[in-house]
Image (cartoon, rainbow, N blue to C red):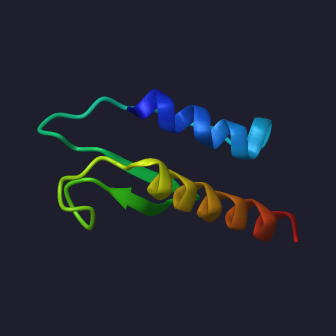
Amino acid sequence: MAAWMANEFFAEAGSDIAIRITPGVGGIFQVFADGEKIYDKNGEENGVFPNLPRVKELRAIIREKLTAAVA
């Protein structure tokens, strides 16, 4: 799951993004962008892994952060 999401994020940002995947325990799965948590499976997502529409939302957040950084 994490590798699939990473590929989606690379597709969005290319070499303008750095991705670190850190194994967790107990079902922890979080995504941070520029230090801000944008996804937390066991938090706001109620234990649900992201589906394609949710990953597209996360890609949009990353795109916005990259655009803001360039501006």
Q: Is residue 64 left or right of residue 57?
A: right
Name the image quarter holding residue 44: bottom left
| Location of residue 24 in the rendering, given as x and y in whole percent from the top left corner | 24, 34
Residue at the image position 58 percent from the left and 58 percent from the top: 34
| Location of residue 22 in the rendering, given as x and y in whole percent from the top left corner | 37, 32
Q: Nearer the viewer, residue 35 or 46?
A: 46
Q: Nearer the viewer, residue 21 or 42?
A: 42
Q: Is residue 30 above or below residue 26?
A: below
Residue at the image position 53 percent from the left and 58 percent from the top: 58
Q: Can residue 26 be seen by looking at this rendering?
A: yes
* Residue lying at the far left of the rendered structure: 26
Name the image quarter holding residue 67: bottom right
| Location of residue 7 in the rendering, given as x and y in whole percent from the top left corner | 59, 32
Q: Is residue 20 above or below residue 44?
A: above
Q: The N terminus is located in which quarter?
A: top left
Q: Is residue 49 above or below residue 39?
A: above
Residue at the image position 41 percent from the left and 33 percent from the top: 2
Q: Can residue 20 be seen by looking at this rendering?
A: no
Q: Is residue 6 left or right of residue 17?
A: left
Name the image quarter holding residue 71: bottom right
Residue at the image position 24 percent from the left and 52 percent from the top: 48
